[in-house]
Amino acid sequence: MCKKAIYPGSFDPFTNGHLDIVKKASALFDCVYIVLGVNAKKKRTYPCEQMKAAIEQTLIDMKISNCVVCVCDGLVAEFAKENGAGYMIRGLRNNMDYNYEENIAEINKLINPDLEYVYFRAENVAFSSSMVKELVGYGKDASAFVPKAVHTLICSGGH
Protein backbone atom coordinates (compact mmCIF):
# COMPACT_ATOMS: atom_id res chain seq x y z
CA MET A 1 0.00 0.00 0.00
CA CYS A 2 1.31 3.42 -0.99
CA LYS A 3 1.72 5.86 1.91
CA LYS A 4 0.63 9.31 0.74
CA ALA A 5 0.87 12.60 2.60
CA ILE A 6 0.00 16.20 1.90
CA TYR A 7 2.05 19.22 2.87
CA PRO A 8 -0.21 22.26 2.45
CA GLY A 9 0.69 25.92 2.71
CA SER A 10 0.52 29.23 0.94
CA PHE A 11 4.23 28.93 0.14
CA ASP A 12 4.30 32.65 -0.68
CA PRO A 13 7.24 32.21 -1.14
CA PHE A 14 8.46 28.64 -0.71
CA THR A 15 11.52 28.82 1.57
CA ASN A 16 14.46 26.60 2.46
CA GLY A 17 12.55 25.83 5.66
CA HIS A 18 9.68 24.44 3.57
CA LEU A 19 12.19 22.51 1.47
CA ASP A 20 13.67 20.99 4.63
CA ILE A 21 10.22 19.69 5.62
CA VAL A 22 9.69 18.32 2.09
CA LYS A 23 13.01 16.45 2.26
CA LYS A 24 12.08 14.88 5.60
CA ALA A 25 8.57 13.95 4.45
CA SER A 26 9.74 12.54 1.10
CA ALA A 27 12.10 10.22 2.98
CA LEU A 28 9.19 8.75 4.97
CA PHE A 29 6.31 8.68 2.49
CA ASP A 30 5.91 7.11 -0.94
CA CYS A 31 4.22 10.23 -2.30
CA VAL A 32 3.99 13.75 -0.90
CA TYR A 33 1.57 16.28 -2.35
CA ILE A 34 2.90 19.79 -1.87
CA VAL A 35 -0.38 21.69 -1.91
CA LEU A 36 -0.45 25.41 -2.58
CA GLY A 37 -3.58 26.53 -0.83
CA VAL A 38 -5.48 29.38 -2.41
CA ASN A 39 -7.32 31.64 0.00
CA ALA A 40 -9.62 34.03 -1.85
CA LYS A 41 -9.44 36.45 1.11
CA LYS A 42 -5.65 36.77 0.93
CA LYS A 43 -3.72 38.47 -1.82
CA ARG A 44 -0.63 36.54 -2.89
CA THR A 45 2.69 38.29 -3.35
CA TYR A 46 3.83 35.77 -5.98
CA PRO A 47 1.41 34.21 -8.51
CA CYS A 48 0.40 30.69 -7.55
CA GLU A 49 1.18 29.06 -10.90
CA GLN A 50 4.63 30.68 -10.99
CA MET A 51 5.40 29.53 -7.44
CA LYS A 52 4.17 26.04 -8.37
CA ALA A 53 6.63 26.00 -11.29
CA ALA A 54 9.47 27.24 -9.06
CA ILE A 55 8.76 24.50 -6.49
CA GLU A 56 8.65 21.89 -9.27
CA GLN A 57 12.03 23.12 -10.53
CA THR A 58 13.39 22.95 -6.98
CA LEU A 59 12.29 19.31 -6.70
CA ILE A 60 14.09 18.55 -9.97
CA ASP A 61 17.21 20.38 -8.76
CA MET A 62 17.15 18.44 -5.48
CA LYS A 63 16.43 15.13 -7.26
CA ILE A 64 13.27 14.58 -5.23
CA SER A 65 11.02 12.48 -7.42
CA ASN A 66 8.21 11.36 -5.11
CA CYS A 67 6.55 14.74 -4.65
CA VAL A 68 3.77 16.33 -6.70
CA VAL A 69 3.01 20.06 -6.55
CA CYS A 70 -0.70 20.90 -6.72
CA VAL A 71 -2.90 23.96 -6.34
CA CYS A 72 -6.01 23.65 -4.18
CA ASP A 73 -8.73 26.25 -3.80
CA GLY A 74 -10.82 24.07 -1.49
CA LEU A 75 -10.37 22.43 1.89
CA VAL A 76 -7.07 20.57 2.26
CA ALA A 77 -8.71 17.82 4.35
CA GLU A 78 -10.99 17.10 1.38
CA PHE A 79 -8.03 17.26 -1.01
CA ALA A 80 -6.31 14.62 1.13
CA LYS A 81 -9.36 12.36 1.06
CA GLU A 82 -9.86 12.79 -2.71
CA ASN A 83 -6.20 11.91 -3.38
CA GLY A 84 -5.90 9.01 -0.94
CA ALA A 85 -3.49 10.82 1.37
CA GLY A 86 -3.80 9.68 4.97
CA TYR A 87 -1.26 12.06 6.49
CA MET A 88 -0.97 15.82 6.87
CA ILE A 89 2.59 17.12 7.15
CA ARG A 90 3.28 20.25 9.17
CA GLY A 91 6.49 21.97 10.21
CA LEU A 92 6.84 23.39 13.70
CA ARG A 93 9.17 26.20 14.71
CA ASN A 94 7.93 26.65 18.26
CA ASN A 95 5.10 25.98 20.71
CA MET A 96 2.95 28.74 19.17
CA ASP A 97 3.08 26.88 15.85
CA TYR A 98 2.07 23.70 17.64
CA ASN A 99 -0.94 25.31 19.32
CA TYR A 100 -2.04 26.90 16.04
CA GLU A 101 -1.64 23.61 14.15
CA GLU A 102 -3.53 21.61 16.76
CA ASN A 103 -6.53 23.92 16.46
CA ILE A 104 -6.59 23.44 12.68
CA ALA A 105 -6.04 19.70 13.11
CA GLU A 106 -9.21 19.43 15.16
CA ILE A 107 -11.25 21.03 12.39
CA ASN A 108 -9.62 18.92 9.69
CA LYS A 109 -10.30 15.75 11.69
CA LEU A 110 -14.02 16.65 11.67
CA ILE A 111 -13.89 16.90 7.87
CA ASN A 112 -11.65 13.87 7.35
CA PRO A 113 -11.50 11.64 10.47
CA ASP A 114 -8.91 9.34 8.88
CA LEU A 115 -6.36 12.13 8.43
CA GLU A 116 -3.35 11.79 10.73
CA TYR A 117 -1.00 14.66 11.48
CA VAL A 118 2.77 14.29 11.32
CA TYR A 119 4.85 17.14 12.71
CA PHE A 120 8.44 17.81 11.74
CA ARG A 121 10.70 20.08 13.71
CA ALA A 122 11.83 22.99 11.57
CA GLU A 123 15.60 23.40 11.47
CA ASN A 124 15.69 27.08 10.53
CA VAL A 125 13.32 28.58 13.05
CA ALA A 126 14.44 32.19 12.58
CA PHE A 127 13.08 32.73 9.10
CA SER A 128 9.71 32.57 7.42
CA SER A 129 7.99 33.52 4.18
CA SER A 130 7.04 36.83 5.80
CA MET A 131 10.67 37.55 6.66
CA VAL A 132 11.75 36.75 3.09
CA LYS A 133 9.09 39.11 1.69
CA GLU A 134 10.21 41.84 4.07
CA LEU A 135 13.87 41.45 3.06
CA VAL A 136 12.96 41.55 -0.63
CA GLY A 137 10.74 44.58 0.01
CA TYR A 138 13.74 46.43 1.39
CA GLY A 139 15.90 45.40 -1.56
CA LYS A 140 17.96 42.92 0.48
CA ASP A 141 19.34 39.62 -0.81
CA ALA A 142 17.17 36.68 0.27
CA SER A 143 19.06 34.02 -1.69
CA ALA A 144 20.25 32.28 1.49
CA PHE A 145 16.64 31.65 2.55
CA VAL A 146 14.99 30.29 -0.60
CA PRO A 147 15.82 27.68 -3.25
CA LYS A 148 17.46 28.94 -6.43
CA ALA A 149 14.32 28.65 -8.62
CA VAL A 150 12.28 30.57 -6.05
CA HIS A 151 14.97 33.23 -5.78
CA THR A 152 14.83 33.70 -9.55
CA LEU A 153 11.05 34.19 -9.29
CA ILE A 154 11.10 36.64 -6.41
CA CYS A 155 13.90 38.67 -8.03
CA SER A 156 11.76 39.01 -11.17
CA GLY A 157 9.02 40.50 -9.01
CA GLY A 158 6.83 37.48 -9.53
CA HIS A 159 5.22 38.79 -12.67
Image (cartoon, helix red, strand yellow):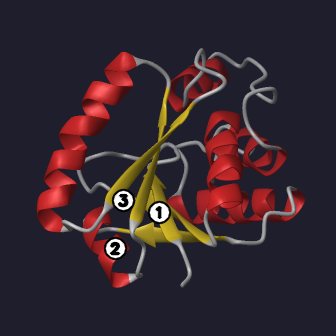
Which numbered dot is residue 38? 3
Return the x and y of residue 122 as percentages of the image width and height: 58, 29
36 w.r.t. 69: above or below: above
The Cα–Cα distance between marks 1 and 3, rounded to whole angstroms, is 15 Å
Image quadrant in which you'd find residue 56: bottom right
Image quadrant in which you'd find residue 108: bottom left
Q: Earlier in the sequence, mark 2 or mark 1?
A: 1
Q: Residue at x 53, y 73 (%)?
A: 3
Callout 2 crowding tier (Cα within 10 Å): few <14, some 14–19, many ≥20: many
Three-letter code, disc 1: Ile
68 w.r.t. 154: above or below: below
Q: Earlier in the sequence, mark 2 or mark 3?
A: 3
Name the secondary structure under disc 2: helix
Return the x and y of residue 136 as percentages of the image width and height: 66, 25
Which numbered dot is residue 79? 2
Callout 3 crowding tier (Cα within 10 Å): few <14, some 14–19, many ≥20: some
Q: Residue at x 80, y 46 (%)?
A: 152
Q: Would residue 47 appear left or right of 18 to someone viewing this image?
A: left
Name the secondary structure under disc 1: strand
- View extreme (left): residue: 110
Callout 1 crowding tier (Cα within 10 Å): few <14, some 14–19, many ≥20: many
Return the x and y of residue 37 as percentages of the image width and height: 39, 58
Residue on which the image places disc 1: 6
Q: Residue at x 57, y 28 (%)?
A: 133
Please report contact status of discs 2 and 1: CB closer than 8 Å, yes or no: yes
Q: Would residue 121 appear left or right of 123 to someone viewing this image?
A: left
